[in-house]
Every structure is written in C-alpha cells, then in structure tokens.
Image (tube, rainbow, N blue to C red):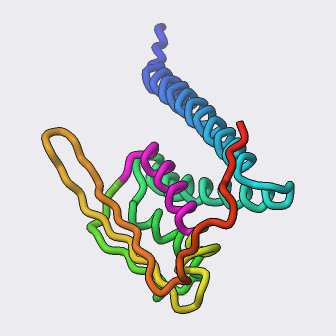
Amino acid sequence: MAFFLDLTERKQAEERQKLLLNELNHRVKNTLVIVQAIAAQTLRTTDSPKAFTEAFGARLLALSQTHNLLNETSWQSASLHDIVWAELALYAEGDARRFSLAGRDVALRPEAAVTLGMVFHELSTNAAKYGALSVPSGQVEVSWNVNTCAAERRIHLEWHETNGPPVRAPSARASVRA
C-alpha cells in the first residue's frame, strides 16, 4: 500500500507568506524612516514642546490618512484626488465649498502618494494658519493635469488661494537648527 501527499499548495502558501512578510518588513522600515524625518523636521521648525507635540501629531495623522488610502488598494496605489481632498477637508472644517479640485483622477504609486500626502498636509496647514483657510471667506483651488512623454508621466499641480488675508513679510527671519 502506497500513500502520496501532494504538498504543492502548502509550499506555495508558505512562499506567499514569506514574500508578504518581507514586503511588510520593508514597508515598516520605510515608514519608520519617514517618521524619523518628520520628527527631525518638526523639531527644527517648532519652538516649544507643546508646538512640537501638536505639529508632530498632525503630521503623523496625515501620514496615517495616506496609509489608509493605500490600504484600500492593498498598497498598489492611492488616488490623487482622495489625498488632496482628505487634507483640505480637515483644514476647511469639512466645508467642501471652501476648496475645489480639478483634474482627472490619477492613481499614484505608494511612494508618490506618501510624499504628496505630506506636501498637501503642509500646504493645508499653512493655509489654515496664515492663508485662505484662516478666514471664513477664503478658498483654495487645486488643479492638476498629467503629461505623458515617452515612458514618463509627469503631473503638473497648481495650488491657488483666494480671498485670504493680505500677505505680509515674516516678522523674523526663520532659522534652521542643525
């Protein structure tokens, strides 16, 4: 009497699990590098522990929001529209009349999504503190278009604030601590 056991599916499952674990480790390391950079940048641009805590927490929340969008597609891509909307909606207190988005939606690779998520967080934060979103009548318009040449895809983004407070020169020159 002979008995045969086919282990092919089990071996394939183990290989998939190993691949996924390696990918997860890679993403965690990348995320920790980003968090370290966010902490260093925040430390350079804040003047008190309270200001650091608030700014660092807000930046981590922005990173988390982008990660949530990427999780919806199993980290394949994130929508440019969704990234911009998530950041502006937070600082416009959910009032979509305070901002407009124009451009065909673009699926961004994870690296680009994380980077642009942080960029739009910073722009939105500045608009809420000093720009158009700091006054009830202010509005932000974000537009983009995609240019494809050869094998390269480029996105042209424009951020435009209207009805904000008058722009004033900074009262003190910003210093960067090393």
- In the picture, measured across the screen, residue 36 lies left or right of residue 65, that is right
Q: Quadrant of residue 61?
A: bottom right
- Of helix, strand and loop, which mostly describes the magenta segment? helix
Above or below for 1 versus 119:
above
- In the picture, measured across the screen, residue 7 lies left or right of residue 177, that is left
Above or below for 134 versus 123:
below
Could you say which is closer to the camera, residue 80 or residue 72? 80
- In the picture, measured across the screen, residue 41 lies left or right of residue 105, that is right
Residue appearing at x 46%, y 88% in the figure: 97
In the rendered image, residue 15, in percent from the top left (x then y), is placed at 49, 23
Residue found farthest to the top = 1
- In the picture, measured across the screen, residue 27 lies left or right of residue 141, that is right
Magenta stretch bounds:
108-124
In the rendered image, residue 156, in percent from the top left (x then y), is placed at 29, 58
In the rendered image, residue 102, in percent from the top left (x then y), is placed at 31, 74
Residue appearing at x 52%, y 31% in the figure: 23
Could you say which is closer to the camera, residue 132 or residue 98? 132
Residue found farthest to the left = 150
Above or below for 144 versus 8:
below
Residue appearing at x 72%, y 41% in the figure: 177
Q: Report the label total.
A: 0
Residue appearing at x 34%, y 61% in the figure: 157
Residue found farthest to the right = 49
Quadrant where the C terminus sits is top right
Q: Is residue 43 magenta?
A: no
In the rendered image, residue 5, in percent from the top left (x then y), is placed at 48, 17
Q: Quadrant of residue 140?
A: bottom left
Residue found farthest to the bottom = 137
